[in-house]
């Protein structure tokens, strides 16, 4: 059993594995989970389907591993001493291109996450939660500094505000979410809702 | 040509057509656009696939027509004289069951709308826009009454706030959007962002 696992793992180098996971994420953004086939992954990565099945067992496992492999970039702690500057800095860590890619990934997985609990868990644990924990740390410090009242009811909706603007932008404006859009939304909506003056 | 169109239309009664569109929307909520097949529609509605293709031509046309057939219920104008009461009343027009169904429909169409412009247009024109025009009418009256300043920057983000909370609830809280949730979100986020006191 241990030998078999080693044999399976040894088939691919880490670089090759990363390349493969990258191709899976690209395909998810382009066609979505339901339309993604092992044939398409094999063609895109010049692998054999037999290799893919031997290594990952199937599509659900391959996609979950690809998401797990993905790490949101640059989670270094942000602490400027002002909530407004902190929120702007958090948004600015991802360039517009990465933001559009993440929005496409959410879209590609939206339906499948409802029918596949493993996929939902992987996506929440590895993409949504690390990002949102950052927002919560920044807000906790704003409360500690007295910038936001601890009983402000908007504190319970910060993730809905932020992720909501991120995911609805394309439907409402026919545009991807960008730094400029989210920065303006933070100033117009999030800070006033949290009782922080932006003027 | 006119005769052929009449012959095609005469195959189904309006009641039967409504039943068929209802089944298409149910399937969209359950499995999403990409996984939806004409076979599944035929099985669910006890029709022959030949009839479906003769009547609608294909999946994209059938789904667009089913969305067009759908009318958001009760768009009677809301005007209570207070923005808070108006927003609460708008949200209360749909019961929790209908709201969960609409959220599921958005999910089922999210990916397909990106690759199919006709589907996106049908969904925006027939589901998103009528709903959002109502919000804009209510906000315009609040500005006219002097309840909201005409230059409040959050006015440009009302749809992002509302639709964002609606669509992200399941991902963040593992729960569908409900009346209670949206009413609380209006009070905690939307009214403070618009500079309206809720106390």
Image (cartoon, coloured by chain):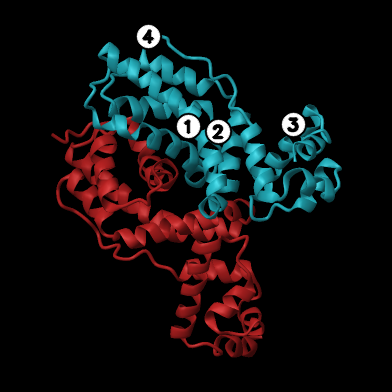
Chain colours: A red, B cyan
Q: Which residue is mark 2?
A: B126
Furthest-top residue in this view? B81
| Chain assignment, label 3 | B
Q: Are marks 2 and 4 on the same chain?
A: yes
Q: Nearer the viewer, residue B90 or B22?
A: B22
**SS for tag 2?**
helix
Vertical relation: B113 (above or below) A193: below
| Chain assignment, label 1 | B
Q: Does the CB distance between marks 3 and 2 fall below 8 Å? A: no
Distance of label 3 from label 1 (alpha carbons): 22 Å
- Between discs 3 and 1, the one toward the N terminus: 3
Q: Which residue is mark 4?
A: B81
Q: Which residue is mark 3?
A: B18
**SS for tag 3?**
helix
Distance of label 1 from label 4 (alpha carbons): 23 Å
Q: In the displayed structure, does residue B104 sit left or right of residue B15? A: left
């Amino acid at each position: 059993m241990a030998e078999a696992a080693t044999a399976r793992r040894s088939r691919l180098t880490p670089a090759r594995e990363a390349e493969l996971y990258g191709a899976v994420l690209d395909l998810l953004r382009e066609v979505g989970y339901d339309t993604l086939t092992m044939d398409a992954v094999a063609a895109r990565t010049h692998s054999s389907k037999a290799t893919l099945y031997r290594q990952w067992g199937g599509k659900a496992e391959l996609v979950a591993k690809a998401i797990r492999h993905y790490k949101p970039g640059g989670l270094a702690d942000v602490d400027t001493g002002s909530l407004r500057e902190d929120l702007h800095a958090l948004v600015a860590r991802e360039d517009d291109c990465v933001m559009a890619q993440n929005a496409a990934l959410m879209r590609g997985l939206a339906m499948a996450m409802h029918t596949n609990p493993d996929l939902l868990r992987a996506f929440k644990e590895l993409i949504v939660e690390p990002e949102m924990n950052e927002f919560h740390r920044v807000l906790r410090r704003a409360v500690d500094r007295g910038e936001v009242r601890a009983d402000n009811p908007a504190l319970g909706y910060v993730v809905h505000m932020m992720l909501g603007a991120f995911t609805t932008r394309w439907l409402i404006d026919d545009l991807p979410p960008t730094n400029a859009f989210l920065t303006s939304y933070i100033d117009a909506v999030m800070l006033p809702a949290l009782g922080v003056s932006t003027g």
